[in-house]
Image (cartoon, coloured by chain):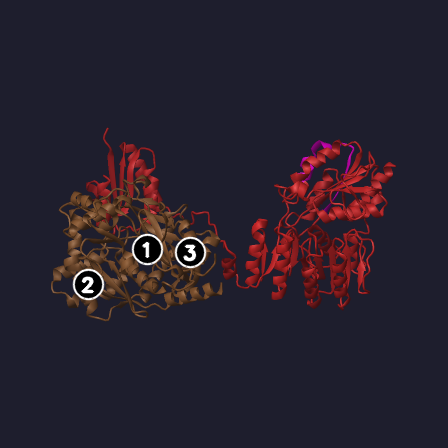
């Protein structure tokens, strides 16, 4: 018991002492040297092509065409089925990706450095709303946007960031929480705050005013631009928390559209998986829950650090996705998540909850003791490849992941 | 038949996207509506609406800060109705529309965090889980009241030993009643604050004594429950002795009442020794015991009423109650007692025994026959004991447990008097007197005499005075306390002879 308490104390200390800074945007081939030709990193725990959901397969076909590994989508799917590509989780390469979470050689990745622990984490740039690859979109417009991100926008943001000392993210999150963001479904405040920090450097380092205007408009027109920054930040905060002997703190939660997977500090890099659940939510016109794909993406790294569904009290409107949906009860989600967290974050507080700190450090023992699974705010993809986002909502992490992890943790500390 | 599309643009009108999605769902579900959406006119939202076949030329000029209402309906009438409804939703501030349910902690840990000043946990989970929860509470430095029953005696001993080492009290298991610093816990009554402390191994006994003291002008400092097994050899009176220490050290407590079934001899010796070491005065009620060797600072009471009177310094309670004046000849010789309170049932047995009457009971005190015995005696039944409550709520919570037994007693021609308790207070049924009157129905017009008393106070949620009035209005004879009701019942059967 004391071993676990001490280990968890250490885990929470590492989380709270993190100093994540957005420092660069560089091609994936530079960021992740182990990333090779014909390798495709995806969201969630490991999954084989045959077990992948529609949007995951759609995104893989699209990214293979984008990388020039296939002539068209059909060709790409055929190649994927015959084992032409190596599939690996982003999490195995210091990276995360939203929804389908495609990461390949030529894509620009944002670099977040945790200056306290000297580790780096990576995430692709957010493509914006509408038809996008992260939701399984793969038509010409999707690939054209990815090309622009690779050739123009990514390098421009990279230049801007390298011209200064990087953008520290902790205080940005703190301000975002006071402005209505929970950093999963709501990133409008932090996207604006980031743009404010980034715009002068972008202007100083730009060589083409039209491209500069396009870049500024791209960030300004995308309420979710900051989500991918928050995810890379989350990964950079949680990676140093891995492998603390005896710790029952969750270091990653992610989904591949088929399975939900968690990692726990004391059990190292083992994934504990269970089938993903369906989100409860609201749908865009023309779509219903019959169109929805099960839960997907690495974005649950945001909940792992105490944001998203854990910080619902900061974003009362988001409570509207569930049940009666009274915004006045959003704080109940946060208080409930406090029941499964080892501590609170004194720097990330919610004004409307009398500056309650966001719940920090999911303790699998508390999850199982209370029967309260982590609440996750999420987007909802269409179940068919190529369509895109159809709604948004709230979902729970499957309890079975935590049961498996607890048994393994008990064995790791000598409890039979 | 072709669809009708209506668009309306509200310039410079902003509403949160989740709120708009909820409105969209409401409008889309109206009769005759094929699809509908209310969205801010950002480029990506316009694309979604275009893909859903919801846009017409009306919304061409709409920009990011404008709201588009897009409706596709089977006909113009349905579309217009939906448009009106959409505008009504947009123009009617809803305020709090949820159930307004406030947050309740689900775990002990969260509860302690929410109330860091709390120092007691009341545990009322199924017996199998009660010991684990109690242990968690103790390790968080909380005193424990275990309302739960079906906890093993081994668990009880282990918990009490651990608590003892931590300087914490474990009240229970199966502890029905406590009052700590004026706060009633589980089945308890709103009594006057004062200088008399109570230690009780029984729930209704503690309720009756604290209420009688309160009615007699005294008050309660604390009433500490110990659980029905604390004074057995296996437990050795751990909680009782700690409660004695606590009340002895409490400057607010002047006099201490101890109430229990007659304890195991070795345990009793320790308790008596502890009492002798105190500077305070004691009343001891080992219900069913007619004599006990006690030190000079303690006196034995035979009944709960007598215990209350001694605690009040010898003041007689209800001196103006004349059983003889109220008594009527019973139509038959036997009394049938039907009790929800176990100790009230025991008190009746004590008094019948003292009056020389032969009694039998399913919860027999020493010297009383078991119910199965082949005898022609008064039957005094505890309806709260296991054989009546297996899989059912306790009769104090659900008085209908007594209904069948009442009907049986009425039909039994040997029964001249039915003697009852009506227990009110926190945790009890919200109108037990009303239920009793309804349940008796036409039987109230019959010959069988019905005698009752109400355990509780006028400050209780059910109001004692109101309950008594209800009983009297129905023709039930009401005595001021359980002991007096017993005396009245005895008077009635004696008039029969």
Callouts 3 and 2 in the same chain: yes
Query: Does residue A322 sit above or below A221 in this rendering?
Result: above
Which residue position is annotated with label 1? A184
- Would residue B315 be found to the left or right of residue A139 on screen? right
Can you give x and y, in whole percent of width and height, for residue B496 in the image? Answer: 86, 36
- The label nearer to you, 1 versus 3, is 3
Q: Residue at x 49, y 65 (%)?
A: A2
- Indicate the quadrant containing the C terminus of chain B: top left, top right, bottom left or bottom right: top right
- The label nearer to you, 2 versus 1, is 2
**Subunit of label 2:** A
Earlier residue among tags 2 and 1: 2
Which residue position is annotated with label 2? A30
Q: Are marks 3 and 2 in contact (CB under 8 Å)?
A: no
Query: Does residue B126 sit above or below B139 in this rendering?
Result: above
Callouts 1 and 3 in the same chain: yes
Can you give x and y, in whole percent of width and height, for residue B467 in the image? Answer: 69, 44
Residue stretch in magenta:
B434-454
Which residue position is annotated with label 3? A408
Earlier residue among tags 3 and 2: 2
Q: Nearer the viewer, residue B150 or B405?
A: B150
Can you give x and y, in whole percent of width and height, for residue A228 in the image? Answer: 27, 58
Q: Nearer the viewer, residue A52 or B46?
A: A52
Can you give x and y, in whole percent of width and height, for residue A382 in the image? Answer: 27, 43
Q: Colour of chain B?
A: red
**Callout 1 environment at 10 Å: few (<14), some (14 to 19), or many (20+)?**
many
Spatial separation of the CA atoms under disc 1 and disc 3: 30 Å
- Quadrant position of residue B146: bottom right
Q: Which chain is brown?
A: A
């Amino acid at each position: 018991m004391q071993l676990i308490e001490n280990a968890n104390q250490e885990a929470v200390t590492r989380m709270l002492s993190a100093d994540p800074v957005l420092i660069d945007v560089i091609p994936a081939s530079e960021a992740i040297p182990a990333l090779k030709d014909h390798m495709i990193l995806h969201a969630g725990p490991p999954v084989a092509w045959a077990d992948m959901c529609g949007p995951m397969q759609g995104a893989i076909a699209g990214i293979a065409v984008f990388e020039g590994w296939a002539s068209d989508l059909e060709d790409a799917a055929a190649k994927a089925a015959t084992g032409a590509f190596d599939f690996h989780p982003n999490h195995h390469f210091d990276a995360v990706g939203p929804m389908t979470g495609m990461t390949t050689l030529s894509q620009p990745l944002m670099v977040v450095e945790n200056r306290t622990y000297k580790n780096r984490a990576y995430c692709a740039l957010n493509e914006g709303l509408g038809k996008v690859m992260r939701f399984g979109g793969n038509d010409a417009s999707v690939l054209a946007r990815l090309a622009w991100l690779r050739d123009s926008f990514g390098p421009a943001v990279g230049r801007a960031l390298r011209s200064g000392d990087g953008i520290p993210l902790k205080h940005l999150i703190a301000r975002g929480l006071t402005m209505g963001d929970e950093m999963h479904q709501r990133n409008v405040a932090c996207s604006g705050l980031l743009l404010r920090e980034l715009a002068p450097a972008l202007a100083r380092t730009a060589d083409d005013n039209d491209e500069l205007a396009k870049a500024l408009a791209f960030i300004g027109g995308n309420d979710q631009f900051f989500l991918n920054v928050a995810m890379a930040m989350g990964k950079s905060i949680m990676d140093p928390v891995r492998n603390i002997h005896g710790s029952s703190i969750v270091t990653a939660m992610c989904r591949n559209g088929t399975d939900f997977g968690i990692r726990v500090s004391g059990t190292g890099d083992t994934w504990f998986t269970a089938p993903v659940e369906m989100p409860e939510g609201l749908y865009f016109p023309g779509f219903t829950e019959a169109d929805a794909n099960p839960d997907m993406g690495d974005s649950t790294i945001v909940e792992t650090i105490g944001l998203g569904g854990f910080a619902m009290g900061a974003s009362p409107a988001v409570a509207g996705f569930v049940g009666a949906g009274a915004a006045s009860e959003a704080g109940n989600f946060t208080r409930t998540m406090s029941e499964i967290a080892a501590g609170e974050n004194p720097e990330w507080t919610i004004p409307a909850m009398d500056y309650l700190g966001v719940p920090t450090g999911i303790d699998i023992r508390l999850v199982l003791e209370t029967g309260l699974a982590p609440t996750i705010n999420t987007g909802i993809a269409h179940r068919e490849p190529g369509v895109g986002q159809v709604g948004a909502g709230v979902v729970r992490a499957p309890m079975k992941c935590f049961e498996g992890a607890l048994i393994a943790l008990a064995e790791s500390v000598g409890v039979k | 038949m072709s669809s009708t599309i209506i668009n309306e643009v509200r310039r410079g009108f902003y509403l949160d996207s989740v709120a708009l999605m909820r409105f969209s769902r409401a409008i889309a579900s109206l009769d005759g509506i094929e699809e509908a959406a209310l969205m801010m006119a950002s480029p990506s939202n316009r694309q979604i609406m275009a893909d859903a076949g919801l846009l017409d030329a009306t919304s061409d000029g709409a920009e990011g800060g404008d709201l588009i209402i897009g409706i596709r309906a089977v006909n113009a009438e349905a579309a217009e109705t939906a448009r009106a409804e959409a505008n009504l939703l947009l123009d009617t501030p809803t305020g709090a529309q949820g159930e307004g349910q406030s947050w309740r902690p689900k775990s002990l840990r969260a509860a302690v965090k929410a109330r860091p000043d709390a120092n007691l946990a009341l545990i009322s989970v199924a017996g199998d889980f009660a010991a684990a929860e109690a242990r968690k509470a103790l390790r968080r430095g909380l005193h424990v009241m275990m309302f739960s029953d079906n906890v093993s005696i081994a668990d009880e001993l282990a918990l009490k030993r651990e608590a003892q080492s931590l300087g914490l009290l474990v009240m229970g298991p199966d502890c029905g009643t406590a009052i700590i610093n004026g706060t009633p816990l589980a089945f308890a009554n709103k009594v006057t604050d004062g200088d008399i402390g109570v230690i009780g191994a029984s729930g209704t006994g503690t309720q009756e004594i604290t209420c009688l003291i309160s009615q007699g002008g005294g008050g309660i400092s604390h009433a500490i429950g110990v659980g029905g097994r604390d004074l057995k050899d296996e437990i050795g009176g751990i909680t009782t002795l700690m409660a004695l220490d606590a009340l002895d050290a409490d400057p607010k407590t002047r006099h201490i009442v101890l109430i229990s079934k007659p304890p195991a001899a070795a345990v009793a010796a320790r308790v008596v020794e502890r009492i002798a070491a105190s500077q305070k005065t004691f009343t001891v009620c080992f219900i069913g015991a007619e004599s006990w060797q006690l030190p000079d600072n303690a006196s034995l009471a035979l009944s709960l009423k007598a215990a209350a009177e001694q605690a009040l310094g010898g003041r007689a309670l209800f001196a103006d109650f004349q059983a003889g004046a109220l008594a009527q000849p019973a139509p038959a010789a036997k009394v049938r007692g039907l009790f929800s309170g176990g100790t009230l049932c025991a008190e009746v047995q004590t008094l019948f025994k003292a009056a020389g009457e032969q009694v039998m009971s399913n919860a027999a005190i020493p010297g009383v026959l078991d119910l199965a015995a082949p005898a022609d005696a008064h039957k005094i039944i505890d309806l709260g004991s296991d054989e009546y409550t297996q899989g059912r709520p306790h009769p104090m919570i659900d008085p209908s447990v007594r209904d069948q037994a009442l009907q049986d007693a009425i039909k039994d021609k040997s029964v001249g008097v039915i003697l009852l308790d009506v227990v009110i207070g926190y945790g009890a049924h919200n109108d037990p007197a009303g239920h009793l009157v309804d349940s008796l129905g036409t039987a109230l017009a019959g010959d069988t005499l019905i005698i009752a008393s109400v355990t509780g106070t006028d400050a209780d949620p059910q109001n004692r005075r109101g309950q008594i009035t209800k009983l009297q209005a129905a023709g039930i004879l009401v005595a001021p306390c359980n002991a007096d009701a017993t005396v009245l019942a005895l008077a009635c059967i004696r008039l029969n002879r």
